[in-house]
Image: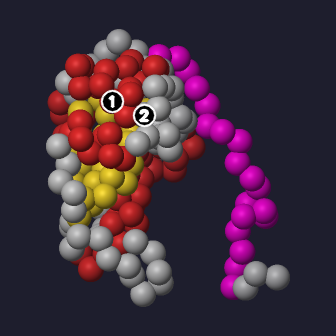
Amino acid sequence: MEVMEAIRTRFSSRGFADREVEPEKIRLIMEAGRLAPTGSNEQMNKHIVVTDKALIHQMVAACKDQEWIHTAPAILVEVGANDRTMVCGHSVRLTDGVIAMSYMTLEAVSLGLQFVWLGWFEPEKVRSLLNIPDDYMVVAVAPFGYAAKEGSPAPKKSAEEVIVYNRME
Protein backbone atom coordinates (compact mmCIF):
# COMPACT_ATOMS: atom_id res chain seq x y z
CA MET A 1 0.00 0.00 0.00
CA GLU A 2 1.29 3.45 -0.89
CA VAL A 3 1.50 6.17 1.76
CA MET A 4 -1.36 8.24 0.27
CA GLU A 5 -3.60 5.17 0.21
CA ALA A 6 -2.86 4.60 3.91
CA ILE A 7 -3.67 8.25 4.61
CA ARG A 8 -6.93 8.03 2.66
CA THR A 9 -8.08 4.76 4.27
CA ARG A 10 -7.18 5.42 7.92
CA PHE A 11 -10.12 5.73 10.28
CA SER A 12 -10.55 5.71 14.04
CA SER A 13 -11.64 2.19 14.94
CA ARG A 14 -13.36 1.93 18.32
CA GLY A 15 -13.74 -1.81 18.29
CA PHE A 16 -11.36 -4.54 17.23
CA ALA A 17 -11.71 -8.07 15.92
CA ASP A 18 -10.81 -10.93 18.24
CA ARG A 19 -7.54 -11.48 16.42
CA GLU A 20 -3.99 -10.99 17.61
CA VAL A 21 -1.64 -8.72 15.69
CA GLU A 22 1.21 -10.73 14.25
CA PRO A 23 4.60 -10.07 15.94
CA GLU A 24 6.19 -9.17 12.59
CA LYS A 25 3.56 -6.46 12.03
CA ILE A 26 4.16 -5.06 15.51
CA ARG A 27 7.89 -5.05 14.77
CA LEU A 28 7.34 -3.11 11.53
CA ILE A 29 5.10 -0.58 13.27
CA MET A 30 7.70 -0.04 15.99
CA GLU A 31 10.42 0.28 13.36
CA ALA A 32 8.43 3.08 11.72
CA GLY A 33 8.40 4.90 15.07
CA ARG A 34 12.09 4.27 15.63
CA LEU A 35 12.96 5.77 12.25
CA ALA A 36 10.81 8.89 12.73
CA PRO A 37 12.70 12.18 12.98
CA THR A 38 13.27 13.73 16.39
CA GLY A 39 14.36 17.18 17.54
CA SER A 40 18.16 17.47 17.20
CA ASN A 41 18.09 13.69 16.55
CA GLU A 42 18.01 13.20 20.33
CA GLN A 43 15.74 10.13 20.10
CA MET A 44 14.43 10.49 23.66
CA ASN A 45 11.03 8.83 23.06
CA LYS A 46 10.02 5.27 23.85
CA HIS A 47 7.29 3.32 22.10
CA ILE A 48 5.59 0.99 24.62
CA VAL A 49 3.50 -1.83 23.18
CA VAL A 50 0.96 -3.33 25.57
CA THR A 51 -0.23 -6.78 24.48
CA ASP A 52 -0.90 -8.42 27.86
CA LYS A 53 -4.69 -8.90 28.06
CA ALA A 54 -4.86 -8.26 31.82
CA LEU A 55 -2.92 -5.03 31.42
CA ILE A 56 -5.12 -3.95 28.50
CA HIS A 57 -8.18 -4.47 30.74
CA GLN A 58 -6.51 -2.30 33.40
CA MET A 59 -5.83 0.38 30.78
CA VAL A 60 -9.61 0.83 30.39
CA ALA A 61 -9.76 2.60 33.78
CA ALA A 62 -6.75 4.77 32.85
CA CYS A 63 -8.62 5.74 29.68
CA LYS A 64 -11.76 7.13 31.34
CA ASP A 65 -13.57 3.77 31.35
CA GLN A 66 -13.93 3.50 27.59
CA GLU A 67 -14.99 -0.15 27.68
CA TRP A 68 -14.39 -0.83 23.99
CA ILE A 69 -10.63 -0.50 24.64
CA HIS A 70 -10.54 -4.04 26.05
CA THR A 71 -11.25 -5.30 22.50
CA ALA A 72 -7.84 -4.06 21.31
CA PRO A 73 -5.19 -6.76 20.95
CA ALA A 74 -2.52 -4.08 21.44
CA ILE A 75 -2.13 -0.56 22.76
CA LEU A 76 0.70 1.77 21.87
CA VAL A 77 1.78 4.24 24.53
CA GLU A 78 4.19 6.92 23.37
CA VAL A 79 6.40 8.57 25.99
CA GLY A 80 9.29 11.02 25.89
CA ALA A 81 12.02 11.94 28.37
CA ASN A 82 13.98 15.07 29.15
CA ASP A 83 11.52 17.48 27.62
CA ARG A 84 12.63 20.91 26.57
CA THR A 85 10.99 23.81 24.82
CA MET A 86 12.12 24.55 21.28
CA VAL A 87 12.78 28.11 20.15
CA CYS A 88 9.31 28.14 18.58
CA GLY A 89 7.80 27.53 22.02
CA HIS A 90 6.68 23.93 21.46
CA SER A 91 7.55 20.88 23.54
CA VAL A 92 10.15 18.84 21.69
CA ARG A 93 9.02 15.53 23.24
CA LEU A 94 5.39 16.13 22.40
CA THR A 95 6.37 17.01 18.84
CA ASP A 96 8.68 13.98 18.54
CA GLY A 97 5.95 11.73 19.89
CA VAL A 98 3.30 13.02 17.52
CA ILE A 99 5.62 12.52 14.54
CA ALA A 100 6.45 8.97 15.63
CA MET A 101 2.77 8.19 16.23
CA SER A 102 1.92 9.45 12.74
CA TYR A 103 4.56 7.21 11.18
CA MET A 104 3.40 4.21 13.21
CA THR A 105 -0.26 4.85 12.41
CA LEU A 106 0.41 4.91 8.68
CA GLU A 107 2.55 1.77 8.85
CA ALA A 108 -0.23 0.00 10.77
CA VAL A 109 -2.82 1.00 8.17
CA SER A 110 -0.53 -0.13 5.36
CA LEU A 111 -0.44 -3.55 7.09
CA GLY A 112 -4.25 -3.81 7.23
CA LEU A 113 -4.66 -2.57 10.83
CA GLN A 114 -6.35 0.47 12.30
CA PHE A 115 -5.33 2.79 15.14
CA VAL A 116 -7.30 5.23 17.24
CA TRP A 117 -5.55 8.01 19.12
CA LEU A 118 -7.13 8.67 22.48
CA GLY A 119 -7.55 12.10 23.98
CA TRP A 120 -9.36 10.65 26.98
CA PHE A 121 -6.67 9.13 29.17
CA GLU A 122 -5.17 9.99 32.52
CA PRO A 123 -1.38 10.24 32.16
CA GLU A 124 -0.67 9.50 35.82
CA LYS A 125 -2.76 6.33 35.77
CA VAL A 126 -1.03 5.20 32.56
CA ARG A 127 2.34 6.03 34.15
CA SER A 128 1.54 3.95 37.23
CA LEU A 129 0.22 0.94 35.28
CA LEU A 130 3.18 0.79 32.92
CA ASN A 131 5.89 1.76 35.42
CA ILE A 132 6.86 4.85 33.40
CA PRO A 133 9.52 6.94 35.18
CA ASP A 134 8.62 10.46 36.31
CA ASP A 135 10.99 12.12 33.84
CA TYR A 136 8.92 10.79 30.91
CA MET A 137 5.81 12.56 29.67
CA VAL A 138 2.97 10.37 28.41
CA VAL A 139 2.36 11.73 24.93
CA ALA A 140 -0.25 9.41 23.47
CA VAL A 141 -2.27 6.26 23.97
CA ALA A 142 -3.52 4.41 20.89
CA PRO A 143 -5.28 1.04 20.80
CA PHE A 144 -4.73 -0.81 17.53
CA GLY A 145 -5.55 -4.01 15.75
CA TYR A 146 -7.83 -5.39 13.06
CA ALA A 147 -11.02 -3.33 12.95
CA ALA A 148 -14.12 -5.26 14.04
CA LYS A 149 -16.13 -3.61 11.30
CA GLU A 150 -15.50 -1.59 8.19
CA GLY A 151 -15.12 2.10 8.69
CA SER A 152 -14.40 5.17 6.70
CA PRO A 153 -12.34 8.27 7.30
CA ALA A 154 -14.07 11.29 8.78
CA PRO A 155 -14.99 13.97 6.22
CA LYS A 156 -12.28 16.55 5.67
CA LYS A 157 -12.49 20.17 4.62
CA SER A 158 -11.70 21.02 1.01
CA ALA A 159 -8.16 21.89 -0.06
CA GLU A 160 -9.29 25.48 -0.65
CA GLU A 161 -10.35 25.75 3.00
CA VAL A 162 -7.09 24.53 4.55
CA ILE A 163 -4.21 25.14 2.16
CA VAL A 164 -2.56 28.53 1.94
CA TYR A 165 0.35 29.48 -0.28
CA ASN A 166 2.80 32.11 0.85
CA ARG A 167 0.66 34.35 3.11
CA MET A 168 -2.68 34.17 4.78
CA GLU A 169 -5.08 36.81 3.53
Q: Position of residue 29 (x, y in %)?
A: 28, 43
The secondary structure type at the circle numbered 2 is: loop
**Which secondary structure, mark 1?**
helix
Q: Is residue 5 above or below residue 138?
A: above
- Evaluate whether residue 98 shows in this view: yes
Which stretch appears magenta?
A: 147-166
Dot label at residue 59: 1
Please report the residue visible at 46 percent of the width from the left and 20 percent of the height from the top.
Answer: 68
Q: Quadrant of the C terminus?
A: bottom right
Q: Indicate left or right for 138 with 155 as reference.
A: left
Which percent across, then down, holds residue 90?
45, 75
Quadrant in the picture for residue 114: top left
Contact (Cβ within 8 Å) of mark 2 with mark 1: yes
Q: Which residue is drawn at 31% across and 21% down?
A: 57
Q: Relative to 161, does residue 148 appear above or below in the rendering? A: above
Instruction: Please report the residue visible at 17 percent of the width from the left and 43 percent of the height from the top.
Output: 131
Q: Which colour scheme is used?
A: secondary structure
Q: Is residue 8 above or below residue 25?
A: below
Q: Is residue 28 visible?
A: no
Q: Quadrant of the N terminus?
A: top left
Residue hosting label 2? 63
Image position of 57 (left or right of 42): right
* 137 sits to left or right of 23: right
Residue furthest to the right: 169
Looking at this view, name the residue that lies furthest to the top: 18
Amino acid type indicated by mark 1 = Met
Does the magenta stretch mainly form a helix, a strand or a loop? Answer: loop
Q: Residues within 10 Å of mark 2 (few under 14, many from 20)?
A: some
**Three-letter code, disc 2:** Cys
